Image: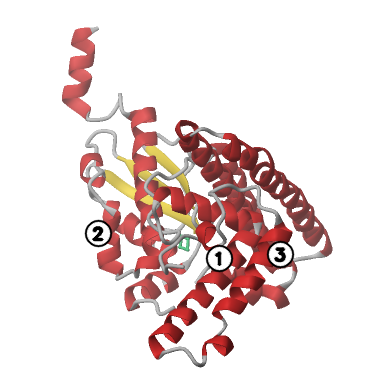
Amino acid sequence: MAYSDKVIEHYNNPRNVGSFTKDTPGVGTGLVGAPECGDVMKLQIKVNLDTGVIEDAKFKTFGCGSAIASSSLATEWLKGKTVDQAAEIKNTDIVNELKLPPVKIHCSVLAEDAIKAALSDYKAKWGESAGAGQAAATATTSS
Amino acid sequence: MSQTVNYFEVFGLPRTLGIDAGQLQAKFYELSRRYHPDFQQSAPPAEQERALTLSALVNTAYRTLRDPIARIEYLVRLEEGRDTREGSAVKPAAPPELLEEIFEVQEMLEDAKASGLDDEGRNRLAAERDRLVARCRQEEELLTGALAADWDEASPAGRPRVVAAFKAALATRAYLRTVIDDLEAALDPAGETDVTHHRH
Ligand code: FES
């Protein structure tokens, strides 16, 4: 199967490969798999707890070229976004950017799933302490 | 026979999983003969064309239904109205422990490959592989045994629940098989091109 240039580029130079220690403040981890092929992907975000902005993102994917490219691209897109903006990234954005063919759609879905999983893990772990000022203030006054 | 029948209908079977292998084979031979191009030479071109399509359909249908796991995968697609493995509406959620475990094995494999495989490393990988192969077999037995029987006994209302159970077990099997393939490839680099075929 012919990969697009962008897939090959990300595959050869994957951005942000690696991991953060899970319980570092502000880190959210998503570990997901694609039942279609059995590939697995881990994606982590590191959120600045004062601003709610994703400062860094890392991934590790044991999967096909498209899955590696999708997750590499996802980590690039995540950096600098707020948690809410990050939730808007769709697998179709990845498909368009990487020009993935229909049989590789599930690889981009895997990346979207990983983003969602990382965001919800982040919210579960650090959601209370995030959003800074207002959220913290309401929490104290209402208690 | 119409060209749009499903694989079960090709053989005149109900949508059940308990299929007698001998009967299936006999029916396959019969249909293969019926649509074989050699027996169609005097037929009009449109008829020949149709026979060709049907003979291809019979072949694929047989290959799919003959294999008890492929049979289940096909049944799930049929129940969900999909043509390919892409586009499953509801993704089965993998048990998180399974993904964690598979991720760990993959990382161990990665480290082992990076540091060069010595005998001890090979033995560890082989032991992992054997353990995972046994797990995979269990999952297959569950699919073709208890779950297949559940399907055949289920009332129409009970069927979606069995489909969900099939999907969960098929997903578990897919995760296991991929990591097993990767272990195999590391242990036997010569066979690599064979076993990594699932990644294009
Ligand atoms: S082939 Fe499965 S993630 Fe790409």
Image vertical order of residue B90 relative to residue B42, above or below = above
Which numbered disc flags the more N-terminal residue, 1 or 3? 1
Residue B93 at x, y percent in the picture: 47, 40
Q: Is residue B22 left or right of residue B156?
A: right
Provide the chain ID for the residue under circle 1.
Answer: B
Q: Which residue is mark 1?
A: B61
- At 61% from the left edge and 48% from the top edge, which residue is drawn? B17
Residue ID for mark 2: A93
With respect to residue B143, does A134 lie above or below? Answer: above
Q: Nearer the viewer, residue B60 or B174?
A: B60
Is the CB of mark 3 within 8 Å of ligand 1?
A: no
Q: Is residue A111 visible?
A: yes
Q: Is residue A106 left or right of residue B72?
A: left
Q: Residue at x 39, y 76 (%)?
A: A3
Q: On the image, numbered disc 3 is attached to which residue?
A: B184
Which chain is indicated by disc 3?
B
Q: Nearer the viewer, mark 1 or mark 3?
A: 1
In this view of the protein, which residue sits in the foreground, A43 or A126? A43
Taking B54 as reference, is A45 left or right?
Answer: left
